[in-house]
Image: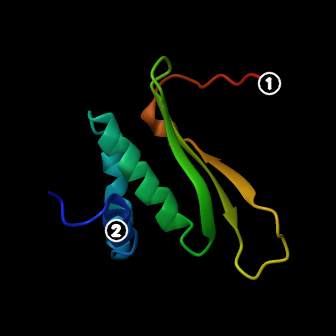
């Protein structure tokens, strides 16, 4: 049994020293997709830790071998009350160009 929840473990990683931020990028290339997803989640949440984040999701497009994250964030004490949407593609993960449809 793991003594800590997933959220507690991620929170601990998000709050680690700045040097961890640079190391996370190397896990974007890990052969295990779940480890890649977790590294991306920690990376994004660490970069946006000054904001209130909601609806965070990671996706893996197997056809294009593309991993990406999508979330909403609110600037604390900001003038914008509506959540802002952010999508992050670590572009170096795939040699294929993503295609977008409307």
Q: Residue extending furthest left? A: 1
Of the pair 95 and 45, the residue shown nearer to us? 45
38 to 75, vertically: above or below: above
Q: In which quarter of the image is residue 8?
A: bottom left
In the rendered view, does 90 fall on the left or right side of 9?
Answer: right
Identify the secondary structure beneath mark 1: loop
Residue located 46% across and 29% down the image: 94
x 38%, y 63%: residue = 7
Residue sitting farthest toward the bottom? 77
Q: How many marks?
A: 2
* Left or right of residue 9, residue 83 in this image: right
Q: Please tell me whether residue 4 is drawn above or below residue 31 in the rendered image.
A: below
At 40% from the left edge and 68% from the top edge, which residue is drawn?
14
> How busy is the neighbourhood of tag 1: few (under 14 within 10 Å), some, or many (20 plus)?
few
Where does residue 83 sit, x and y in percent of width and height?
75, 61
**Residue 98, quarter of picture:** top right
Quarter in which the C terminus is drawn? top right
Q: Position of residue 41 (x, y in %)?
A: 45, 53
Residue 49 in the image: x percent, y percent?
53, 71
Residue identified by numbered label 2: 8
In the rendered image, which residue does mark 1 sit on? 102
Q: Is there CB contact under 8 Å for labels 1 and 2? A: no
Q: What element carries label 2?
A: helix
The CA span between labels 1 and 2 is: 37 Å
Between marks 1 and 2 in the image, the one whose residue lies nearer the viewer: 2
Badge number at residue 68: none
Q: Nearer the viewer, residue 9 or 39?
A: 9
Image spot of residue 43 (x, y percent): 44, 58
| 1 or 2: tag closer to the N-terminus | 2
Residue at 31%, 59% (x, y): give it.
23
């Amino acid at each position: 049994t793991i003594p800590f929840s997933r959220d507690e473990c991620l929170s601990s990683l998000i709050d680690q020293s700045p040097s961890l931020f640079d190391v996370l990028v190397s896990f974007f290339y890990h052969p295990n997709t779940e480890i890649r997803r977790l590294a991306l989640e920690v990376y994004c949440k660490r970069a946006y830790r000054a904001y209130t984040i909601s609806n965070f999701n990671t996706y893996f497009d197997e056809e294009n071998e593309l991993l990406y994250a999508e979330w909403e964030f609110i600037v604390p004490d900001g003038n914008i009350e509506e959540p802002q949407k952010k999508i992050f593609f670590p572009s170096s993960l795939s040699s294929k160009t993503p295609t977008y449809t409307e």
